[in-house]
Amino acid sequence: MKKRIVAMLLTGAVICTMTAAGCSRKTSQPDTNQVEDASDGEQENKGQENKGAENGSQEAGDPETTEQAKSDQELADEVAALIDAIYVQTRTDETEAQCADAKKAWDALTDAQKALVAGENADPDYFGRDTGDASKDDPRNQDEIGENEILVVSFGTSFNDSRVQDIKGIEDAIQAAYPEWSVRRAFTSQIIINHVQARDGEVIDNMEQALERAVANGVKHLVVQPTHLMHGSEYDDLAEAVASYSDKFETVKVAEPLLGEVGTDATVINADKEQVARALTDEAVKDAGYDSLEAAREAGTAFVFLGHGTSHTAKVSYSQMQTQMGNLGYENVYIGTVEGEPEETSCEAVIEAVKEAGYKKVILRPLMVVAGDHANNDMAGEDADSWVSMFTASGSFEGVEAQIVGLGSMESIQKIYIDHVAAIMNP
Protein backbone atom coordinates (compact mmCIF):
# COMPACT_ATOMS: atom_id res chain seq x y z
CA MET A 1 0.00 0.00 0.00
CA LYS A 2 2.79 2.43 0.91
CA LYS A 3 4.55 1.64 -2.38
CA ARG A 4 1.34 2.53 -4.31
CA ILE A 5 1.04 5.87 -2.49
CA VAL A 6 4.67 6.75 -3.22
CA ALA A 7 4.20 5.83 -6.88
CA MET A 8 1.12 8.02 -7.16
CA LEU A 9 2.93 10.96 -5.60
CA LEU A 10 5.85 10.63 -7.99
CA THR A 11 3.50 10.46 -10.97
CA GLY A 12 1.66 13.62 -9.82
CA ALA A 13 4.94 15.46 -9.45
CA VAL A 14 5.95 14.62 -13.01
CA ILE A 15 2.59 15.79 -14.40
CA CYS A 16 2.76 19.11 -12.55
CA THR A 17 6.29 19.64 -13.80
CA MET A 18 5.22 19.06 -17.42
CA THR A 19 2.19 21.39 -17.14
CA ALA A 20 3.73 24.22 -15.08
CA ALA A 21 3.11 26.80 -17.82
CA GLY A 22 -0.57 25.87 -18.01
CA CYS A 23 -1.02 26.10 -14.23
CA SER A 24 0.60 29.51 -14.28
CA ARG A 25 -1.91 30.85 -16.84
CA LYS A 26 -4.87 29.64 -14.79
CA THR A 27 -3.76 31.38 -11.60
CA SER A 28 -3.50 34.73 -13.47
CA GLN A 29 -7.15 34.67 -14.62
CA PRO A 30 -8.73 36.29 -11.49
CA ASP A 31 -6.49 39.38 -11.92
CA THR A 32 -7.87 39.89 -15.46
CA ASN A 33 -11.43 39.83 -14.17
CA GLN A 34 -10.60 42.41 -11.50
CA VAL A 35 -9.26 44.81 -14.11
CA GLU A 36 -12.43 44.50 -16.22
CA ASP A 37 -14.66 45.18 -13.20
CA ALA A 38 -12.66 48.18 -11.97
CA SER A 39 -13.51 51.83 -12.47
CA ASP A 40 -11.80 53.83 -15.26
CA GLY A 41 -9.12 55.25 -12.99
CA GLU A 42 -8.46 51.85 -11.43
CA GLN A 43 -8.22 50.23 -14.84
CA GLU A 44 -5.64 52.79 -15.84
CA ASN A 45 -3.55 52.21 -12.72
CA LYS A 46 -3.85 48.43 -12.92
CA GLY A 47 -2.84 48.54 -16.56
CA GLN A 48 0.30 50.44 -15.63
CA GLU A 49 1.03 47.95 -12.84
CA ASN A 50 0.60 44.92 -15.12
CA LYS A 51 2.89 46.53 -17.70
CA GLY A 52 5.47 47.11 -14.98
CA ALA A 53 5.21 43.48 -13.86
CA GLU A 54 5.86 42.31 -17.42
CA ASN A 55 9.06 44.36 -17.43
CA GLY A 56 10.24 42.82 -14.20
CA SER A 57 9.17 45.70 -11.90
CA GLN A 58 6.90 45.54 -8.83
CA GLU A 59 3.83 43.26 -9.02
CA ALA A 60 0.35 44.83 -8.87
CA GLY A 61 -0.64 45.51 -5.30
CA ASP A 62 2.88 46.07 -4.00
CA PRO A 63 3.27 49.04 -1.59
CA GLU A 64 5.48 51.03 -4.01
CA THR A 65 2.92 50.78 -6.86
CA THR A 66 0.01 51.72 -4.58
CA GLU A 67 1.94 54.73 -3.31
CA GLN A 68 2.69 55.87 -6.89
CA ALA A 69 -1.02 55.70 -7.80
CA LYS A 70 -1.83 57.79 -4.75
CA SER A 71 0.72 60.45 -5.65
CA ASP A 72 -0.71 60.64 -9.18
CA GLN A 73 -4.11 61.42 -7.70
CA GLU A 74 -2.63 63.97 -5.35
CA LEU A 75 -0.98 65.79 -8.25
CA ALA A 76 -4.25 65.75 -10.18
CA ASP A 77 -6.11 67.07 -7.13
CA GLU A 78 -3.67 69.96 -6.82
CA VAL A 79 -4.40 70.98 -10.41
CA ALA A 80 -8.14 70.63 -9.80
CA ALA A 81 -7.85 72.98 -6.84
CA LEU A 82 -5.96 75.52 -8.96
CA ILE A 83 -8.69 75.37 -11.63
CA ASP A 84 -11.45 75.77 -9.07
CA ALA A 85 -9.64 78.82 -7.68
CA ILE A 86 -9.96 80.64 -11.03
CA TYR A 87 -13.46 79.36 -11.76
CA VAL A 88 -14.88 82.46 -10.10
CA GLN A 89 -16.74 85.56 -11.19
CA THR A 90 -14.54 88.02 -9.28
CA ARG A 91 -11.15 89.15 -10.54
CA THR A 92 -8.44 89.98 -7.98
CA ASP A 93 -4.83 91.11 -8.05
CA GLU A 94 -3.83 87.42 -7.88
CA THR A 95 -5.96 86.24 -10.80
CA GLU A 96 -3.29 86.60 -13.49
CA ALA A 97 -0.73 84.62 -11.47
CA GLN A 98 -3.35 82.01 -10.57
CA CYS A 99 -4.19 81.47 -14.24
CA ALA A 100 -0.50 80.98 -15.07
CA ASP A 101 0.04 78.62 -12.12
CA ALA A 102 -2.94 76.46 -13.08
CA LYS A 103 -1.73 76.02 -16.67
CA LYS A 104 1.87 75.34 -15.60
CA ALA A 105 0.73 72.65 -13.17
CA TRP A 106 -1.51 71.09 -15.81
CA ASP A 107 1.29 70.97 -18.36
CA ALA A 108 3.49 69.18 -15.84
CA LEU A 109 1.04 66.26 -15.52
CA THR A 110 1.28 63.06 -17.51
CA ASP A 111 -1.67 62.08 -19.71
CA ALA A 112 -2.72 59.52 -17.10
CA GLN A 113 -2.61 62.13 -14.33
CA LYS A 114 -4.61 64.64 -16.43
CA ALA A 115 -7.39 62.09 -16.74
CA LEU A 116 -7.68 62.06 -12.92
CA VAL A 117 -8.33 65.81 -12.60
CA ALA A 118 -11.71 66.36 -10.94
CA GLY A 119 -12.93 69.15 -8.69
CA GLU A 120 -15.99 71.22 -7.97
CA ASN A 121 -15.76 72.70 -11.48
CA ALA A 122 -12.50 71.22 -12.72
CA ASP A 123 -12.23 68.36 -15.18
CA PRO A 124 -9.77 67.25 -17.91
CA ASP A 125 -11.68 69.25 -20.54
CA TYR A 126 -10.88 72.57 -18.86
CA PHE A 127 -7.41 72.56 -20.40
CA GLY A 128 -7.60 69.45 -22.55
CA ARG A 129 -10.56 70.02 -24.85
CA ASP A 130 -9.75 71.22 -28.35
CA THR A 131 -12.12 74.11 -29.15
CA GLY A 132 -10.19 75.59 -32.06
CA ASP A 133 -7.34 78.02 -32.68
CA ALA A 134 -7.33 80.95 -30.25
CA SER A 135 -4.74 82.78 -32.36
CA LYS A 136 -7.46 83.54 -34.93
CA ASP A 137 -9.26 85.70 -32.39
CA ASP A 138 -8.69 89.37 -31.57
CA PRO A 139 -9.27 90.30 -27.91
CA ARG A 140 -9.61 93.97 -28.95
CA ASN A 141 -7.91 95.18 -25.79
CA GLN A 142 -5.60 97.60 -27.57
CA ASP A 143 -5.01 101.16 -26.40
CA GLU A 144 -4.82 104.19 -28.76
CA ILE A 145 -8.60 104.16 -28.97
CA GLY A 146 -9.20 107.79 -29.82
CA GLU A 147 -12.16 109.92 -28.83
CA ASN A 148 -14.90 107.63 -30.20
CA GLU A 149 -15.37 104.05 -29.04
CA ILE A 150 -17.94 101.33 -29.62
CA LEU A 151 -17.61 98.80 -26.80
CA VAL A 152 -19.11 95.47 -27.83
CA VAL A 153 -20.05 93.57 -24.69
CA SER A 154 -20.66 89.80 -24.70
CA PHE A 155 -21.21 87.17 -22.06
CA GLY A 156 -18.31 85.31 -23.67
CA THR A 157 -17.32 81.76 -24.57
CA SER A 158 -14.29 79.55 -24.02
CA PHE A 159 -14.92 77.80 -27.35
CA ASN A 160 -12.28 79.39 -29.56
CA ASP A 161 -13.89 78.69 -32.93
CA SER A 162 -17.25 79.98 -31.69
CA ARG A 163 -15.65 83.11 -30.26
CA VAL A 164 -14.06 83.84 -33.64
CA GLN A 165 -17.12 83.08 -35.73
CA ASP A 166 -19.84 84.53 -33.51
CA ILE A 167 -18.44 87.25 -31.25
CA LYS A 168 -15.57 88.43 -33.44
CA GLY A 169 -17.92 88.16 -36.40
CA ILE A 170 -20.24 90.76 -34.84
CA GLU A 171 -17.34 92.99 -33.77
CA ASP A 172 -15.77 92.91 -37.23
CA ALA A 173 -19.10 93.75 -38.88
CA ILE A 174 -19.63 96.74 -36.60
CA GLN A 175 -16.06 97.93 -37.17
CA ALA A 176 -16.55 97.72 -40.94
CA ALA A 177 -19.78 99.71 -40.66
CA TYR A 178 -18.15 102.39 -38.48
CA PRO A 179 -14.50 102.68 -39.57
CA GLU A 180 -14.12 106.08 -37.88
CA TRP A 181 -14.85 104.54 -34.48
CA SER A 182 -12.64 102.17 -32.49
CA VAL A 183 -14.36 98.89 -31.65
CA ARG A 184 -13.28 97.25 -28.41
CA ARG A 185 -14.42 94.15 -26.50
CA ALA A 186 -15.57 93.27 -23.00
CA PHE A 187 -16.92 90.02 -21.55
CA THR A 188 -19.28 89.93 -18.58
CA SER A 189 -18.26 86.40 -17.49
CA GLN A 190 -15.03 86.49 -15.50
CA ILE A 191 -15.16 82.70 -15.35
CA ILE A 192 -14.80 82.56 -19.12
CA ILE A 193 -12.17 85.31 -19.19
CA ASN A 194 -10.05 83.33 -16.73
CA HIS A 195 -10.55 80.10 -18.67
CA VAL A 196 -9.37 81.62 -21.96
CA GLN A 197 -6.45 83.39 -20.32
CA ALA A 198 -5.24 80.32 -18.42
CA ARG A 199 -5.59 77.91 -21.32
CA ASP A 200 -4.68 80.06 -24.33
CA GLY A 201 -2.88 83.10 -22.94
CA GLU A 202 -5.49 85.41 -24.49
CA VAL A 203 -6.34 88.35 -22.23
CA ILE A 204 -9.87 89.74 -22.53
CA ASP A 205 -11.15 92.76 -20.60
CA ASN A 206 -14.05 92.49 -18.20
CA MET A 207 -16.48 95.43 -17.99
CA GLU A 208 -14.51 97.37 -15.39
CA GLN A 209 -11.22 96.89 -17.24
CA ALA A 210 -12.75 97.96 -20.56
CA LEU A 211 -14.31 101.08 -19.06
CA GLU A 212 -11.09 101.98 -17.25
CA ARG A 213 -9.21 101.51 -20.53
CA ALA A 214 -11.62 103.90 -22.24
CA VAL A 215 -11.11 106.52 -19.53
CA ALA A 216 -7.33 106.15 -19.61
CA ASN A 217 -7.36 106.59 -23.40
CA GLY A 218 -9.35 109.81 -23.24
CA VAL A 219 -12.49 108.49 -24.93
CA LYS A 220 -15.15 111.20 -25.10
CA HIS A 221 -18.01 109.42 -26.81
CA LEU A 222 -18.81 105.88 -25.76
CA VAL A 223 -21.41 103.62 -27.38
CA VAL A 224 -22.02 100.25 -25.74
CA GLN A 225 -23.50 97.49 -27.90
CA PRO A 226 -24.45 94.32 -26.00
CA THR A 227 -24.50 91.10 -27.97
CA HIS A 228 -26.83 89.61 -25.36
CA LEU A 229 -30.07 88.13 -26.64
CA MET A 230 -32.42 90.08 -24.37
CA HIS A 231 -32.88 92.45 -21.45
CA GLY A 232 -31.99 89.80 -18.87
CA SER A 233 -29.83 89.83 -15.75
CA GLU A 234 -26.59 90.12 -17.73
CA TYR A 235 -27.92 93.17 -19.54
CA ASP A 236 -29.04 94.70 -16.23
CA ASP A 237 -25.56 94.24 -14.74
CA LEU A 238 -23.99 95.74 -17.85
CA ALA A 239 -26.23 98.81 -17.73
CA GLU A 240 -25.43 99.31 -14.05
CA ALA A 241 -21.69 99.13 -14.70
CA VAL A 242 -21.90 101.65 -17.53
CA ALA A 243 -24.03 104.01 -15.44
CA SER A 244 -21.33 104.11 -12.76
CA TYR A 245 -18.92 105.55 -15.37
CA SER A 246 -21.37 107.97 -17.01
CA ASP A 247 -19.62 111.05 -15.63
CA LYS A 248 -16.29 109.98 -17.19
CA PHE A 249 -17.39 110.67 -20.77
CA GLU A 250 -19.09 113.49 -22.64
CA THR A 251 -21.70 111.05 -23.99
CA VAL A 252 -22.51 107.46 -23.06
CA LYS A 253 -25.17 105.46 -24.87
CA VAL A 254 -26.26 101.83 -24.48
CA ALA A 255 -27.88 100.13 -27.50
CA GLU A 256 -30.54 97.43 -27.51
CA PRO A 257 -29.74 93.69 -27.26
CA LEU A 258 -30.63 91.46 -30.19
CA LEU A 259 -34.34 90.93 -29.47
CA GLY A 260 -34.92 94.56 -28.49
CA GLU A 261 -37.41 95.59 -25.83
CA VAL A 262 -38.98 92.88 -23.71
CA GLY A 263 -42.64 93.85 -23.86
CA THR A 264 -45.36 93.14 -21.33
CA ASP A 265 -46.61 89.67 -22.25
CA ALA A 266 -46.26 86.81 -24.71
CA THR A 267 -48.35 88.55 -27.38
CA VAL A 268 -46.26 91.73 -27.51
CA ILE A 269 -43.63 91.46 -30.22
CA ASN A 270 -41.47 93.93 -32.11
CA ALA A 271 -39.60 94.33 -35.37
CA ASP A 272 -36.38 92.92 -33.90
CA LYS A 273 -38.03 89.64 -32.98
CA GLU A 274 -39.58 89.35 -36.43
CA GLN A 275 -36.22 89.96 -38.10
CA VAL A 276 -34.50 87.36 -35.93
CA ALA A 277 -37.29 84.83 -36.49
CA ARG A 278 -37.09 85.21 -40.26
CA ALA A 279 -33.29 85.18 -40.42
CA LEU A 280 -32.86 82.17 -38.14
CA THR A 281 -35.55 80.11 -39.83
CA ASP A 282 -34.29 80.88 -43.33
CA GLU A 283 -30.76 79.79 -42.43
CA ALA A 284 -31.93 76.62 -40.67
CA VAL A 285 -34.11 75.58 -43.61
CA LYS A 286 -31.30 76.22 -46.09
CA ASP A 287 -28.73 74.32 -44.02
CA ALA A 288 -31.16 71.40 -43.76
CA GLY A 289 -31.31 71.19 -47.54
CA TYR A 290 -34.94 72.25 -48.04
CA ASP A 291 -36.16 74.76 -50.60
CA SER A 292 -38.61 76.27 -48.11
CA LEU A 293 -40.05 75.85 -44.63
CA GLU A 294 -43.24 74.59 -46.25
CA ALA A 295 -41.28 71.89 -48.07
CA ALA A 296 -39.74 70.84 -44.75
CA ARG A 297 -43.20 70.70 -43.15
CA GLU A 298 -44.56 68.52 -45.94
CA ALA A 299 -41.58 66.20 -45.41
CA GLY A 300 -42.54 65.86 -41.75
CA THR A 301 -39.66 67.95 -40.41
CA ALA A 302 -39.87 70.29 -37.42
CA PHE A 303 -37.28 72.84 -36.30
CA VAL A 304 -36.55 73.45 -32.63
CA PHE A 305 -34.62 76.61 -31.78
CA LEU A 306 -32.97 76.28 -28.39
CA GLY A 307 -32.27 79.26 -26.13
CA HIS A 308 -30.67 79.35 -22.71
CA GLY A 309 -33.72 80.22 -20.61
CA THR A 310 -33.86 82.40 -17.51
CA SER A 311 -35.80 83.02 -14.32
CA HIS A 312 -35.57 86.76 -15.07
CA THR A 313 -38.77 88.50 -16.13
CA ALA A 314 -37.23 88.74 -19.59
CA LYS A 315 -38.05 85.04 -20.07
CA VAL A 316 -41.28 86.21 -21.71
CA SER A 317 -39.07 86.98 -24.72
CA TYR A 318 -38.98 83.25 -25.52
CA SER A 319 -42.78 83.07 -25.43
CA GLN A 320 -42.88 86.13 -27.64
CA MET A 321 -40.58 84.41 -30.13
CA GLN A 322 -42.99 81.46 -30.26
CA THR A 323 -45.83 83.91 -30.86
CA GLN A 324 -43.78 85.51 -33.61
CA MET A 325 -43.25 82.15 -35.31
CA GLY A 326 -46.99 81.58 -35.24
CA ASN A 327 -47.74 85.02 -36.66
CA LEU A 328 -45.38 84.29 -39.54
CA GLY A 329 -47.16 81.01 -40.25
CA TYR A 330 -44.15 78.92 -39.18
CA GLU A 331 -46.21 75.98 -37.91
CA ASN A 332 -43.29 73.57 -37.68
CA VAL A 333 -40.99 75.84 -35.65
CA TYR A 334 -40.72 75.48 -31.85
CA ILE A 335 -38.85 77.45 -29.19
CA GLY A 336 -37.11 75.60 -26.36
CA THR A 337 -34.70 76.54 -23.57
CA VAL A 338 -31.93 74.69 -21.74
CA GLU A 339 -33.21 75.89 -18.37
CA GLY A 340 -36.85 75.10 -19.17
CA GLU A 341 -38.02 78.60 -18.29
CA PRO A 342 -40.71 79.44 -19.33
CA GLU A 343 -42.20 75.99 -18.60
CA GLU A 344 -43.55 75.45 -22.10
CA THR A 345 -39.96 75.65 -23.39
CA SER A 346 -38.70 72.64 -21.41
CA CYS A 347 -37.39 69.66 -23.35
CA GLU A 348 -40.23 67.43 -22.20
CA ALA A 349 -42.86 70.00 -23.19
CA VAL A 350 -41.31 70.59 -26.62
CA ILE A 351 -40.95 66.87 -27.32
CA GLU A 352 -44.63 66.39 -26.53
CA ALA A 353 -45.70 69.33 -28.70
CA VAL A 354 -43.64 68.15 -31.70
CA LYS A 355 -44.87 64.56 -31.26
CA GLU A 356 -48.53 65.59 -31.05
CA ALA A 357 -48.14 67.62 -34.25
CA GLY A 358 -47.05 64.43 -36.01
CA TYR A 359 -43.55 65.43 -37.14
CA LYS A 360 -41.14 62.54 -37.61
CA LYS A 361 -37.86 64.38 -38.08
CA VAL A 362 -36.43 67.06 -35.80
CA ILE A 363 -33.66 69.57 -36.46
CA LEU A 364 -32.23 71.37 -33.43
CA ARG A 365 -30.42 74.70 -33.72
CA PRO A 366 -29.30 77.31 -31.14
CA LEU A 367 -31.34 80.41 -30.45
CA MET A 368 -28.12 81.71 -28.97
CA VAL A 369 -25.67 84.35 -30.16
CA VAL A 370 -22.76 81.96 -29.55
CA ALA A 371 -22.67 78.24 -30.36
CA GLY A 372 -20.53 77.43 -27.33
CA ASP A 373 -20.88 75.03 -24.42
CA HIS A 374 -24.69 75.00 -24.36
CA ALA A 375 -24.97 74.31 -28.09
CA ASN A 376 -22.24 71.67 -28.16
CA ASN A 377 -23.12 69.90 -24.91
CA ASP A 378 -26.66 70.70 -23.71
CA MET A 379 -28.12 70.63 -27.21
CA ALA A 380 -25.95 68.28 -29.27
CA GLY A 381 -23.88 66.40 -26.68
CA GLU A 382 -23.63 62.63 -26.29
CA ASP A 383 -24.80 62.58 -22.66
CA ALA A 384 -28.25 61.19 -21.92
CA ASP A 385 -29.60 64.58 -20.82
CA SER A 386 -28.75 66.47 -24.02
CA TRP A 387 -31.66 67.52 -26.23
CA VAL A 388 -30.50 65.32 -29.10
CA SER A 389 -30.31 62.34 -26.76
CA MET A 390 -33.68 62.99 -25.12
CA PHE A 391 -35.48 63.50 -28.45
CA THR A 392 -33.90 60.29 -29.70
CA ALA A 393 -34.69 58.36 -26.50
CA SER A 394 -38.36 59.34 -26.73
CA GLY A 395 -38.69 56.90 -29.62
CA SER A 396 -41.15 59.23 -31.33
CA PHE A 397 -38.95 60.42 -34.19
CA GLU A 398 -37.25 58.77 -37.14
CA GLY A 399 -34.40 61.25 -37.16
CA VAL A 400 -32.91 63.89 -34.87
CA GLU A 401 -30.16 66.24 -36.08
CA ALA A 402 -28.35 69.30 -34.73
CA GLN A 403 -27.05 72.39 -36.50
CA ILE A 404 -24.33 73.90 -34.30
CA VAL A 405 -24.37 77.47 -35.60
CA GLY A 406 -24.43 80.61 -33.47
CA LEU A 407 -26.56 83.61 -34.40
CA GLY A 408 -23.49 85.84 -34.30
CA SER A 409 -21.97 84.21 -37.38
CA MET A 410 -24.97 85.13 -39.58
CA GLU A 411 -24.69 88.32 -41.66
CA SER A 412 -28.41 88.99 -41.30
CA ILE A 413 -28.05 88.97 -37.50
CA GLN A 414 -24.89 91.09 -37.61
CA LYS A 415 -26.91 93.64 -39.62
CA ILE A 416 -29.42 93.91 -36.76
CA TYR A 417 -26.63 94.81 -34.33
CA ILE A 418 -25.31 97.41 -36.77
CA ASP A 419 -28.80 98.90 -36.99
CA HIS A 420 -28.99 99.02 -33.19
CA VAL A 421 -25.75 101.00 -33.08
CA ALA A 422 -27.11 103.40 -35.69
CA ALA A 423 -30.36 103.82 -33.75
CA ILE A 424 -28.54 104.81 -30.56
CA MET A 425 -26.12 107.13 -32.38
CA ASN A 426 -28.91 108.88 -34.26
CA PRO A 427 -32.04 108.66 -32.11
Image: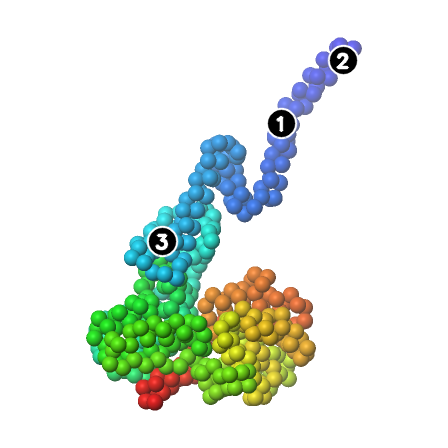
Q: Is residue 250 left or right of residue 383?
A: left
The reply to whether callout 2 and callout 3 are in contact (CB within 8 Å) is no
Q: Position of residue 149 (x, y in %)?
A: 27, 78
Task: Name the residue type under label 1.
Answer: Ala
Q: How is the image coloured?
A: rainbow
Quarter-of-image position of residue 390: bottom right
Residue 280 appears in view: yes
Task: Name the residue type under label 2.
Answer: Arg
Task: Name the residue type under label 3.
Answer: Lys
Q: Secondary structure at mark 2?
A: helix
How many callouts does the rendering have?
A: 3
Quarter-of-image position of residue 132: bottom left
Q: Residues within 10 Å of mark 1 (few under 14, many from 20)?
A: few
Q: Residue at x 58, y 86 (%)?
A: 326
Q: Nearer the viewer, residue 377 or 399?
A: 377
Q: Which residue is mark 1?
A: 20
Q: Secondary structure at mark 1?
A: helix
Q: Gap between marks 2 and 1, in whole Å? A: 24 Å
Q: Which residue is mark 3?
A: 103
Question: Where residue 4 is drawn, which disc sits there?
Answer: 2
Q: Is residue 114 above or below residue 246?
A: above
Q: Nearer the viewer, mark 2 or mark 3?
A: 3
Q: Position of residue 254 (x, y in %)?
A: 35, 80
Q: Residue at x 31, y 68 (%)?
A: 208
Q: Residue at x 29, y 74 (%)?
A: 245
Point out the image quarter for the C terminus.
bottom left
Q: Nearer the viewer, residue 46 or 378?
A: 378
Q: Is residue 278 left or right of residue 392?
A: left
Label 2 or label 1, whichever comes before in sequence order? 2
Label 2 or label 3, whichever comes before in sequence order? 2
